């Protein structure tokens, strides 16, 4: 099969606020779709930080840094699993998650300060 006849995956845009508990719950649906469709589905994160979530904007920037470091989706899932903690403790959680995933947490800290991933 050459490139012109290869089947491309269907892109699923997921609009998400990484501090939102509802987005965390919706992750189960995304996992179910990925399990069912495998490589035929390409989930793509779209940031939608809500004003009511104080740390969602920083989380979106951190997710972009995680993607730059090659671990975007695992980072997103890990942050969504800690939405309550993110709401309570803020950016420290973002840096902890980066470290737990083996990412360069110092680079995350710098990226949050210098604004390289501003949306």
Image (tube, helix red, strand yellow):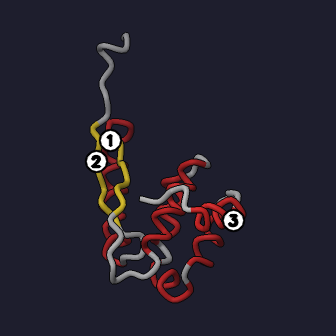
First reached walking from the N terminus: tag 3 or tag 1: 1
- Give the CA separation, mark 3 to mark 2: 28 Å
Q: Name the residue under label 1.
A: 41
Instruction: State the image coordinates of residue 108 (x, y, percent, origin top left).
Output: 64, 62
Residue occupying image coordinates x 33% and y 83%: 52
Frontmost of labels 1 and 2 is 2
Residue occupying image coordinates x 28% and y 47%: 12
Compared to residue 96, the image places residue 75 above or below, namely: above
First reached walking from the N terminus: tag 1 or tag 2: 2
Instruction: State the image coordinates of residue 75 (x, y, percent, origin top left).
Output: 54, 60
Q: Mark 2 points at which residue?
A: 12
Q: Report if the CB atoms under discs 3 and 1 are less than 8 Å apart.
A: no
Identify the secondary structure beneath mark 3: helix
- Give the CA separation, mark 1 to mark 2: 7 Å
Identify the secondary structure beneath mark 1: strand
User: Neighbour class for label 1 at 10 Å: few (<14), some, many (≥20)?
Assistant: some
Instruction: State the image coordinates of residue 48 (x, y, percent, origin top left).
Output: 32, 65
Out of 89 and 7, give the one closest to the viewer: 89
First reached walking from the N terminus: tag 3 or tag 2: 2
Residue occupying image coordinates x 37% and y 10%: 2
Identify the secondary structure beneath mark 2: strand
Q: Report if the CB atoms under discs 1 and 2 are less than 8 Å apart.
A: yes
Q: Residue 106 carries which label?
A: none
- Give the CA separation, mark 3 to mark 1: 29 Å
């Amino acid at each position: 099969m050459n490139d012109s006849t290869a089947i491309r995956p269907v892109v699923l845009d997921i609009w998400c606020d990484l501090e939102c508990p509802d987005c965390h719950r919706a992750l189960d649906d995304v996992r179910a779709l990925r399990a069912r469709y495998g490589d035929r589905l390409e989930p793509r994160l779209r940031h939608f930080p809500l004003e009511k979530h104080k740390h969602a904007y920083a989380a979106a920037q951190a997710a972009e840094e995680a993607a730059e470091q090659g671990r975007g989706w695992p980072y997103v899932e890990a942050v969504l699993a800690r939405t309550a903690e993110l709401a309570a403790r803020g950016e420290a959680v973002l840096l902890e998650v980066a470290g737990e995933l083996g990412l360069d947490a110092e680079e995350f800290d710098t990226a949050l300060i210098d604004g390289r991933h501003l949306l």
